[in-house]
Image: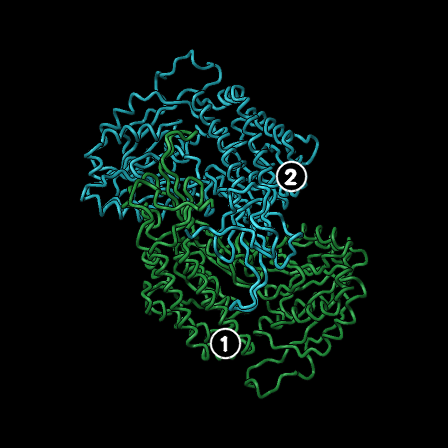
Chain colours: A cyan, B green
Amino acid sequence: MTPTLTPPAGTDPLAAAQAAARPFAALAPSRRADILRAVATTLDADADRLTALAGEETHLPPARLRGELVRTTFQLRLFADLLDDGGYLEVAVDTADSDWPTGPRPQLRRMMVPVGPVLVFAASNFPFAFSVAGGDTAAALAAGCPVLLKAHPGHPRLSRHTARLVVAALTDAGAPSGVFALLEGDDTGRAALVDHRVRAAAFTGSTRVGRLLFDLAAGRPDPIPFYGELGSINPVFVTPAAARARGPRIWSGFVESFTLGAGQFCTKPGLLLAPAGAAEQALVEALEGHPGAAMLNDRLQDGYDRDLAALTAHPAATILVNTRTPETPDVPASDVPASDVPAPVGPALVTATVSALVADPDALAAEVFGPASVLVTYTDPAELLDAARVLEGQLTATIHGEADDPQDAALVRGLLQELSERAGRVLWNGWPTGVSVTHAMTHGGPYPATTSLFTSVGTSSIGRFLRPVTYQNLADDLLPEALRDANPWRLPRRLDGRLFQPDTTDTPDTPDVPDVPDTASVAPVSPQ
Amino acid sequence: MTPTLTPPAGTDPLAAAQAAARPFAALAPSRRADILRAVATTLDADADRLTALAGEETHLPPARLRGELVRTTFQLRLFADLLDDGGYLEVAVDTADSDWPTGPRPQLRRMMVPVGPVLVFAASNFPFAFSVAGGDTAAALAAGCPVLLKAHPGHPRLSRHTARLVVAALTDAGAPSGVFALLEGDDTGRAALVDHRVRAAAFTGSTRVGRLLFDLAAGRPDPIPFYGELGSINPVFVTPAAARARGPRIWSGFVESFTLGAGQFCTKPGLLLAPAGAAEQALVEALEGHPGAAMLNDRLQDGYDRDLAALTAHPAATILVNTRTPETPDVPASDVPASDVPAPVGPALVTATVSALVADPDALAAEVFGPASVLVTYTDPAELLDAARVLEGQLTATIHGEADDPQDAALVRGLLQELSERAGRVLWNGWPTGVSVTHAMTHGGPYPATTSLFTSVGTSSIGRFLRPVTYQNLADDLLPEALRDANPWRLPRRLDGRLFQPDTTDTPDTPDVPDVPDTASVAPVSPQ
């Protein structure tokens, strides 16, 4: 299979990406910021067409899709702001020091540089935010890396249309040709993953596929980083005090969170730990009238049927609700084109005890991608800790507790300890679905949540596509601009280990001090 | 084979490390700083015994060993300073924001936490700085990770003695039992590498062994990061202008650098690119009287003989000098115990053309660990760029040029571009041997130089053993101290994306402002 290429037509996209890598990396961060904003503007301007296409191919409701597109273009602009700040370059300067304890120290100047072309595997469940112009693309472009985007077959027309918009915006904004290309087909994706010109890869999807790709990346003659965001059950722990104080709100919040988007979120809570007898009736009542929702595609629906069947057949599991195929879908026929929207899939809930979970966590804490979850009941609150200890790496873990309850105090601290060792994000009295795109977000965790130590959402995800380079004793005019004495890009820098910020009251084109040897041209952080 | 355990005796070191992980991680960074300094003090106090043992087992000269021990304890103290600064925790706080463009933003607080027990494979060529108490150990302990240290069989008595000192110092300083243990034997090391309790590994050594271990780490059911520092040829490019201006100094510097420590450095220059006819005679003269030096052990010497034989047999290579076994070793017999010091190994130099290198870089740019190097000659300066383009990832790459020479200007810029894409450290008019332990150092590079994007020397190497955790909407008193409003550890933090430093003029126990909601308790970086 040959790659399907969004412009430049007729070119090998891998060769084009490699050719684009150097000029794209050489752009000042502020130039790349402009380019990212141009892409965002172009996508926003075509929001109607984009969301209509996405609706046709994913069966997701219009409001959700509009919100996701807002998130996607916001993300591009947030990375643009990060580039304007420049701290992501992690500039460090060690001045020459003949008295350095380990022997004369040369002048050393370090900065982060892009790794080169990045292969991004799009996900099906977020056709904007984790697809063609999603978070991985935004982070890689921000870092200065060309992007080869392996389209998800779940929304091919949307992928092609988005890619055309991205390429047009990049071209108009002056980005080098070849900085972005769409690849289609699993064979094409795998071939690109083992191509020496690809220097890193990012993936969001199932543990099964993610692990296959991880193994390919690690097995190359020259292994590359593979940033996979794979499986997570996202456990939610409800203390006795929380169940007493506000059980009904917690149970309804849980139903809303695990059925949201037909349960097709990486952060869907697939495990609710609650006192025996506290939640069962309320959950059954909330779920039995649930309308269900169409899943994204047949492949996911087949996988859901398979995994749900395995879960409900488990000898230690009792089915509380299984509305897999409701008799009368509660969706007005006028709202959707009747032709190609599959029947809604209703939610399912099984229950088991903590002892059963501890005895077989591989089966009872297995991710079921779709609107199913497991209620795990306890009789002794200490069992919550037993349950936490058998869980593998997670994107999120949540505690519902009462801060002022004396019984909760020790229990919650114990849970926080266990969960922070297993998850990248620990929530208090909330729901894990909904991942805010911010600076302090972590969307990642110990394997299998992710295959690396990095977050894949938020500004610090840019670090996945950067590596450090140090220049030793290089003359100022030969250095990259980011490292020069005059600090023309006005970057924060670490000077001999201490952090300095550029003087922000000067105009940007005036160095803080005249060009004197080495690093006097940064103003120290005020010790007040 | 069962692991050989430095105290606590009789315990499984992996179980002990796992048990120590939590209390060790919970220590304030300033406490771990004290612990690192205590280890340094203990090692310094036993310098005579340590260097004597090292001399017996490695045949390295006393001055070199004393210098290396200074470097090793300095490194421990530099990491202690890093802990006192606290910036390595990368604290970020996003305040709750109901107007966040992608929907109401919860309060998010992120910090870096230790990954858990780390397995460190010691190297043979730096019996202090890359061995039991070396850089990887210092970085992992600083991060808050217990260390399982796989001893190198090249210096077993030194390893055990150093480990005893480290464990005694850790115990006296109040570190949890099990924070450090010595493992011996290749089987033991491999078993630990695939043990689920080990959460990351670091290695310095050959590409062959490093790749075997990398594959084991990547092939685990739960893959872990494997930070390998493997092979590098460390090319040195001499421009025509530099050769004209100061050829003799460059040729003697090259001989000194590639024969230093019998060529047993990761950063040994194994390739010198010089104008045809410029260097040959001077290099031969400098090398023919060279006394040689004993190699570290028989295994390395056998490998050197094998790799040198392959190099000298290459049809495109011409032997300039091969003093592999000098007739009369220039080592006074009285200086060393005659019994177990092997005969010195003399240096070797072969030459080839750039065309030959370009035609077969795998053979002519292969690392030969020992005092051998390759002189690659060019007739047209543009060939320097051709040579650079066939090189794989490097720890270092060096240019000797003349900044004021008009012909060099374009050539040097072209070389800087090619080399910064291939190496972690780019040197100007210097020699790569000697890696300063500083903040701005990069000791790493694209594969096979390293198997990750991280440096393994310098303070930023701590990042290898940390991962981010974000807390969402957690009450202040339940948060880790590093993230609390009052900022009791006085850490720099990124607040809603902007970097803030704590007010350093207050006494450490006085918060900058009273305890008000969220993050008002940090003083902004002064905009002056």
| Circle 2 Cα neighbour tier, 10 Å, few/some/many (<14 / 14–19 / ≥20) | many
Q: Nearer the viewer, residue B413 or A154?
A: B413
Is residue A419 depicted above or below A43 in this figure?
below
Number of other residues with Cα within 10 Å of mark 1, as a class: few under 14, some 14 to 19, many 20 or more: many
Judged left or right of residue A365, residue A505 is right
The amino acid pointed to by label 2 is Ala
Identify the subunit bearing mark 1: B
Percent across and percent down for residue B347 are: 68, 73
Q: Secondary structure at mark 2?
A: helix
Report x, y in % for residue A202: 52, 40
| Left or right: B220, with B292 as reference point | left
Above or below — where is A270 with respect to B333? above
- Residue bearing the label numbered 1: B54
Q: Amino acid at mark 1?
A: Ala
Label 2 – label 1 distance at C-alpha: 50 Å
Residue at horizontal 37 percent and vertical 40 percent from the top:
B108
Quadrant in the picture for residue B310: bottom right
- Residue A17 is marked as 2
Q: Quadrant of the N terminus of chain B?
A: bottom left
